[in-house]
Image (tube, helix red, strand yellow):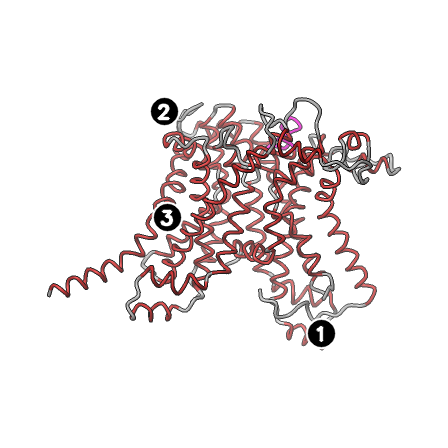
Amino acid sequence: MARETALDLRTRLQEWIPKLVLAPSVAVMLVFVYGFILFTAFLSFTDSKILPSYGLVGWHNYWRLFQLPTWSLAIENLAIFAALYIVICSVIGLTLAILLDQKIRGEGMLRPIYLYPMALSFIVTGTAWKWLLDPGIGIEHTLHLWGWTSFHFAWIKESDFAIYTVVIAAVWQTSGFVMAMFLAGLRGIDNEILKAAQMDGASNWNLYRRIIIPQLRPAFLSAFVILAHLAVKSYDLVVALTGGGPGRATELPATFMYSYTFTRNEMGVGAASAVIMLMTIAAIMVPYLYAELKEPK
Amino acid sequence: MSAVSQGTAVSTGRFTRVLIHVTLLVFALFYLLPLVVMLINSVKPLGEITGGNMMALPKVWTIQPWLEAWSTAQIGVQPTGLRPYFINSIEMVVPAVAISTLMGALNGYVLTKWRFRGDTVLFGLMLFSCFIPFQIVLIPMARLLGLMGLAGTVPGLIFVHVVYGLGFTTLYFRNYYAAFPTELVRAAQIDGAGFFRIFTRILLPLSGPIIVVTVIWQFTNIWNDFLFGSSFSGQASQPMTVALNNLVQSSTGVKAYNVHFAGAILAALPTLFVYIVSGRFFVRGLMAGSVKG
């Protein structure tokens, strides 16, 4: 009898161990991710300025947020940046992947070259491009020295164009990664189908348009989701490349949130902007993750 | 994703092949240009940069900018160079990577081999936490670190990186262990092996590749982090990225471009080194983070 209870206790304990092991991570996640999200959401309805304060003001902060020209500019910049970033990265990534997939002898050399920027910090990328794009010393200056004196390329100094320099640097950093995703997709395609189609006389162009690219749908989806969420989160690159300038020309939601919360002491407005950012990302990620996690059986 | 077939069965003509090679080389130049230019100009005297051509090789070679970036350059108010911040980053990265990887391994093990009702929902919640914009947690985390007495310290940064790295490390191990035969675990259970014994004797010895992938991913992300570093560190605990940004953005005096470049390369070296040594695992990590494994 006593032996049986001891055994019972032991199996009971064994049953509990897995849950006990998982518990700290679950607790950490519930408190520091979801608890903190709720807290920030709560702050966005309060009159918090330099420190959190708990006087409720309803939707006032959101109303104010959308009245602020800086926020409108940040949203507009994000739209331009995200659209160009996603499209250009996908086009370059797909092109490079298709070209690399043609039994290229130097593939082993080229692939790592395309991909290494992904290992760098955005601060390093920003430092390099800030200087390359500086007309007085970078690309423009060099082409002038080489004799093309009418060449003009000073986007980084021009309010209307500075946001495009952020696109250039961001594309440089991530397009190789998109290439790797597409290349993995291409390598997963069954060659037998291609051979059969070729025997039926399909041209290369049709082969890609009709058979290969449609099969890359999952890779397109992944690339879109990853790039879109990186775009919304973009912060470091802007800080290092333009500092949000010239003036406020390259302000993005992430830089807006930081400056309103920590330097302008408008914590309520900052919290509201963070909530909007979260909602944007949730709208992209939640359906994607849901589809990925659904049991395939 | 395996390398069953190298290249498609699509065949192309001679002229097209030349065109393809040229295009690929042009892109290679595009990706290499910024790094090469930084490298060349980090060994030039400043006068050759401001007065000369960035593409030209140095007339006078010098390692002075590197020495300056490492040990004497002005960072913020102190002329310490980047060295103390490099050390800060190491002290932050090593424990943060170790703790988050270990916890991720155990989580993945539980979530695949000791399944219980609601485990997929918990995992889904953890997974979403990888992708949140961290702006949403900055304010409460700043308060909490203050209350815990960890504000502006390296342990505070370690804590933050472990907390927000757990989602990814759990994801990696979960997907890896999902493919691992559950029968082996059941058989060991019947033989009387307990939870930890099965983990250390059966799963862990076979986890080499995924440990490498996870460590590389975490190392790269935490080393390259700027948002947490700039939000939660003090003057004495700044990581490398924040110090580099301070060095480059400082508005006092003449801009010493060559020192900035040397500093930027110093900040990039550890992750570049890891990438060059283990590129295959780096790519696998990137893919596993985006596509279900």
Q: SS at mark 1?
A: helix
Residue A25: numbered disc: 3
Judged from this view, the residue extending furthest toward the left is: A1
The residue located at (46%, 52%) in the rendering is B169
Q: Nearer the viewer, mark 3 or mark 1?
A: 3
Tell whether B161 sits left or right of B271. left
- Structural crowding at the residue carrying mark 2, measured as other residues with C-alpha within 10 Å and reported as few (<14), some (14–19) or many (≥20): few
Three-letter code for the amino acid on which mark 3 is drawn: Ser
N-terminal of the pair, mark 2 or mark 3, is: 3
Q: Which residues are magenta?
A: A242-251
| Circle nearer the N terminus (3, 1) | 3
**Which secondary structure type mostly characterizes the magenta part of the structure?**
loop
Q: Secondary structure at mark 2?
A: loop
Q: Is residue B186 visible?
A: yes
Could one spot residue A95 in this view of the protein? no
Residue marked by disc 1? A198
Please say whether residue A245 is one of the residues in the magenta stretch. Answer: yes
